[in-house]
Image: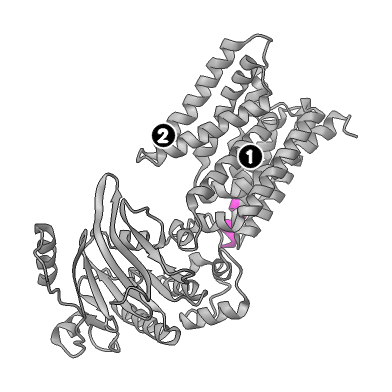
Amino acid sequence: MTLEGALIRSEGLSIRHGGREVLRDVSFAIEAGEIVTVVGPNGSGKSTLLKALIGALPPAAGRVTRRAGLRLGYVPQGLRLDPSMPMTVGRFLNLPKRVAEEGRTRALAEAGAQGLEDRPLTALSGGQFQRVLLARALLDRPELLILDEPTTGLDQPGQAAFYQRLEDVRNSLGCAVLMVSHELHVVMSASDRVLCVNGHICCEGRPEVVAQAEEYRALFGTGTGGALALYRHEHSHRHDETCELDHTHGEDT
Amino acid sequence: MLDDFLVRAVLAAVGAALAAAPLGVFVVWRRMAYFGDATAHAAVLGVALALALSVPIFAATLATALLMALTVAWLSGRGHSADLVLGVAAHGALALGLVAVSLVEGPRLDLESYLFGDILAVTKRDLAVIWGGGAVVAVLIGWRWARLVTSTVSKDLAWAAGINPKREQLTLMLALALVVAVALKVVGALLIGALLIIPAAAARPWSRTPEGMLAGTAALGVLSALGGLWGAWVFDTPAGPSVVCAAALFFSVSFLAGRRAE
């Protein structure tokens, strides 16, 4: 991997939260155009990793470097607007800086949220809301799109449709994608790399495209358009106990 | 014109309502109602300090309110239950202020005027403080508006856009301390919290955007100030509480009409 062209890179990154080391010694880099999916059990530090990358959490050790002037789009996890705050989709897209109308319309169309501009955010369905968040992340024509469990709360066809759309967006923009998936084994089939995180990087590899496999159909039924794939955890190093247990548990289900 | 005490009272009430509006919307959006109370109650302690140290009341209340806001923010950021910290701080500050005032009592102090306001005794100098302080609040929040709104919607979105939400929170603390110091003379320490949240809450059902809600809050705040003073004049009631009553009335009407419109 050439570190020279990396969009964003973490070196020996450790994050402490509430007196506990949530992540330790995480080193990785994302190249332009790459699709990287992060999987891991609950509480494994996946979201923490993304928050450290966007600068919301200070590293306890190590560092995060971005390429100078990197355009970054971010889709946060479980954003919930307080009902006391009035906000239309159009106004939301203009935060924190105003965007020309063509830009807004284009981003909404790309994210599959066209025609929602005048709707209040609180009146959107879960799927519409996720697409609006995606549209907002696309406004800046990002070189790196970071998504934190973007399909939480969507049903399985909804998830597959979201991944499909993300793949289209990525192909037209050519941006790199870093995504946290809440499924331990199911990832976007277009992923170049899958990182399994559990306090540290447990393993790393390519997903298997198994659209015809029984296992896959059992999980997702048919008609997901090949947007999803499975990831098998291949461990290249010895594990601490918790990591092993989590994987064993995950593979049984 | 400013020689008429009624004109000064109207200008003071309108000025305080306008100063409170840009902060009030954030207090409502960020669920800081109790936080506003704790900060306002600290102003009573500021009054006691001002008397003890012979410093201007505005400066002393500004300092204690700011100190209180920072302390409470720091404590709730340390994993303590925010509700508990605020409950202790709000009532503790009030009690401490009342005790402190009784201790420094040199010249007979009219405590009630600091608890409930004394708008009919507003001087030209008070007016300058109210409008000057209000202008600073308006400029401060206007300057940071987009960053503040983004941080309020989501801290993570703010970070990703290169905004530090912690710094924006400090902006709000500073503005809150200013509003407390400005509005003390108008509605008093006990009712500043009401002046902050009630007009904003009343404006919510009719707003589609944050900016629309700000405009509605300012308009309802001014109407409450005028209506309250009119009521105080006609029914011979205390001015500060009358202003808050008017605001509460607007809120009730707005809430009921808003429910019907849904």
Q: Residue furthest top?
A: B106
Numbered disc 1: what chain?
B
Assess whether mark 2 and mark 1 are in contact (beta carbons under 8 angstroms): no
x 68%, y 10%: residue:
B108
> In the rendered structure, which amino acid carries the disc numbered 1?
Leu
Q: Nearer the viewer, residue A159 or A138?
A: A138
Q: Nearer the viewer, mark 1 or mark 2?
A: 2
In the image, is B229 to the left or to the right of B168? right
Residue that mark 2 sits on: B85
Categorize mark 2 by other alpha carbons within 10 Å: few (<14), some (14-19), many (20+): some
> What label sits on residue B195 in the rendered view?
1
**Disc 1 secondary structure class:** helix
What is the x, y in percent for residue A198? 20, 61
Q: Which residues are magenta?
A: B255-262
Outermost right residue: B1
Instruction: Say what amino acid the circle numbered 2 marks.
Output: Val
Quarter of the image with the N terminus of chain B in it: top right
What secondary structure is the magenta-colored segment mainly?
A: helix
Answer yes or no: is residue B228 visible.
no
- Label 2's element? helix
Q: Is residue B80 toward the left or the right of residue B183 in the image?
A: left
